[in-house]
Image (tube, rainbow, N blue to C red):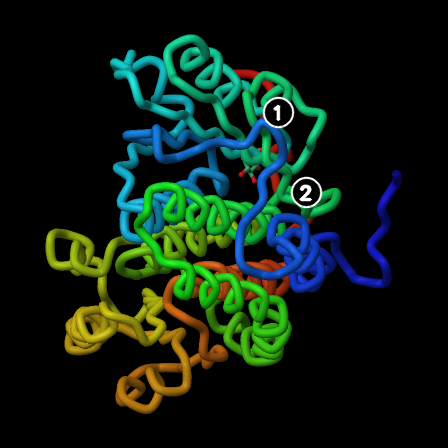
Amino acid sequence: AAVDKAGYKHFMAKEIAEQPTVLQGALAHYIDAAGGSVTLPDPGIDFAGIERLTLVACGTAFYACMVAKYWFEQIARLPVEIDVASEFRYREPPVTPGTAALFVSQSGETADTLAALRYMAGKADRILSVVNVAESSIARESDLALPILAGVEVGVASTKAFTCQLTTLALLVLKAARDRGEIDDAILADHLAALRRLPGIMNAALNIETATRDLAQELSEARDILFLGRGAMYPLALEGALKLKEISYIHAEAYASGELKHGPIALVDPAVPVIVMAPTDGLFDKTVSNMQEVMARGGKVLLITDAAGARTASDGVWKTLILPDVPPFLAPILYAIPAQLLAYHTAIAKGTDVDQPRNLAKSVTVE
Ligand code: G6P
């Protein structure tokens, strides 16, 4: 069915705003009525028999895989390897018994991702995919395809597909943790309850839009922008930089905060805004100390955090964006919102074509 902008100026704006609704649909699809377990479509998968997982994708979907690596390893204690699809099969990675492969793709038609899937077919024990287009090639060639239920995504820069990919992957991680005996029922129920509160929290987070619009005026004048994050917020920093490059054409790079001192800190000067993604979590103090190293060298910091983080760490920063509180496990999903809104409003301030950025295609079906 044809989709329209439903009164929004761009598809991207509509798709950002839709996230609480589509996420709620995805959660309802996978969480059983009693709210205590995750149900997958047939034939399902039992992670008790899986020893390692290979995650492969391109672009934004690859960053979803990167977040999922942290989750699978920490919560399900399952070793994970990830790679971008264009590198994966040419490495000719050896595949040992007990390996499952998982491919993430909005379109389900990305040529490199499909080729990586075909490389793994017959080698891996199971081929799984997380897709938006349920009748796509990648879905058809998988043993088990999990729909993310984001609805049609038109904007070339992926937004709601990313948060729905993350949500579907989070559910799969919980299922894996349960299958492998790494999580007890009470904690599983807590995580599922937190996931079910997420659409409401996402909705509240969309209130930062006015603040991001004001910041974007100034960001649009920068030539380079750095994004920093640690742990599962590192892939969010990468996604923030990718979104900004894609639609505003400003050069942006992301680093794991702890890597800063090994090179990128040389770039710090007042003309290079540094965007730090730091929810209050186990790594918060370490991220803040990296941020202070930036400020000590005259860097202009935009801190994205929660209320408690803002109270302890906003001294000396250029600006703070405050998001609602969220359990650390789900912070990567919530922090996609500022990444998207900053890119969107910076692009608007620059007057670029948000929905159809130059040189980019929504789905890349050639190698
Ligand atoms: C293109 C799009 C990106 C997308 C990537 C992977 O480069 O512009 O937004 O993340 O392809 O697409 P897929 O459909 O496989 O998720």
Q: How many marks?
A: 2
Q: Residues within 10 Å of mark 2 (few under 14, many from 20)?
A: some
Q: Residue at x 63, y 35 (%)?
A: 41
Mark 1 residue crowding within 10 angstroms, few (<14) / some (14–19) / many (20+): many
Q: Position of residue 110 (x, y in %)?
A: 57, 24
Residue, x 48% and y 20% (percent of image)? 112
- Residue 224 found in image quarter: bottom left
Amino acid marked by disc 2: Gln
Foreground: 87 or 80?
80
Please provide percent x and percent y for residue 271: 32, 68
Say which of 116 and 239 sits in front.
116
Mark 1 or mark 2, which has the lower sequence index? 1
Q: Does 161 appear above or below 34?
A: above
Label annotation for residue 139? 1
The percent position of residue 238, horizontal first and vertical second, equals 38, 50
Q: Amino acid at mark 1?
A: Ala
Tell me: residue 347, above or below residue 270. Answer: above
- Residue 108: quadrant of the picture: top right
Ligand 1 rendered quadrant? top right
**Mark 2: which secondary structure?**
loop
- Spot the residue most to the top: 122
Res 356 label: 2
Marks 1, 2: nearer the viewer: 1
User: Can you tell which quarter of the image residue 57 is in?
Assistant: top left
User: How far, Cα to Cα, is label 1 from label 2?
Assistant: 26 Å
Q: Residue at x 47, y 37 (%)?
A: 59
Q: Is residue 220 visible?
A: no
